Amino acid sequence: LAKTTQPISMDSYEGQEVNITCSHNNIATNDYITWYQQFPSQGPRFIIQGYKTKVTNEVASLFIPADRKSSTLSLPRVSLSDTAVYYCLVGDKTDKLIFGTGTRLQVFP
Amino acid sequence: KAGVTQTPRYLIKTRGQQVTLSCSPISGHRSVSWYQQTPGQGLQFLFEYFSETQRNKGNFPGRFSGRQFSNSRSEMNVSTLELGDSALYLCASSLVAGRSDRISYEQYFGPGTRLTVT
């Protein structure tokens, strides 16, 4: 079974850039890497997904190296409302969907 | 467009009982997945349904089962409840499971059903 690990927590200040890395050592060849944000008492919310290199949308960027064994979610200029738990999601080579362990991001004023 | 809805939102059951949870996906979405979320184990994949067929299953015992109806609505059932089944059960829907030859996991989650087993 794949291990998908993330830092447990990160602290940041408003306006800073935050980078959260996920390690996925057994990712399936054809699967996208997807990131979600979760607030308390809510279901996860889709942020971004990519297959390789770099993807950017209006809220985040996703960097994926050539070996695809890790990915980095980049949140530019975070605000207090970005305080949440962030998860990566990948499919592994046994066709199982694996969520990362989650990173609790705390943004301070 | 209405989001994913799950019913009930909260449920209290006793050990040994069974429970059925319901999920209505976003209109037009044909794939429905179920997840269990606990503080200790995090988010764990239960199963995925597409066009009324179970296409993928996580590592859960046979007490956990599900089904999908022709209108894409889905139910999951847990029989012989154990204390460890207390969790937030999340349902997620997506348009399609694959995009060209790559597998997309862009899913939209419901608010979840909080199940407490006493």
Image: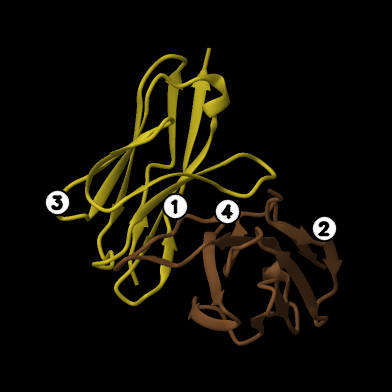
Q: Chain of mark 1?
A: A
Under circle 4, the secondary element is strand
C-alpha gap between disc 3 and disc 1 = 23 Å
Under circle 1, the secondary element is loop
Q: Amino acid at mark 4?
A: Tyr
- How many residues crowd mark 4 within 10 Å: few (<14), some (14–19), many (20+)? many
Q: Amino acid at mark 1?
A: Thr
**Contact between labelled residues 2 and 3, with CB atoms less than 8 Å apart:** no
- Please check whether the numbered discs 3 and 1 fall on a single chain: yes
Q: List the residue tagged with mark 3.
A: A66
- Colour of chain B, in one word, is brown
Under circle 2, the secondary element is strand
Tell me which residue sits at (57%, 53%) in the image: B108
Q: Chain of mark 2?
A: B
Q: Amino acid at mark 2?
A: Tyr
Q: Indicate the chain coloured yellow by its letter.
A: A
Classify residue B28 as left or right of residue A102: right
C-alpha gap between disc 1 and disc 2 = 25 Å
Q: List the residue tagged with mark 2.
A: B10
Q: List the residue tagged with mark 4.
A: B108
Tell me which residue sits at (56%, 72%) in the image: B46
Classify residue B47 as left or right of residue B69: left
What is the quadrant of residue B20 in the picture?
Answer: bottom right
Q: Amino acid at mark 3?
A: Ala
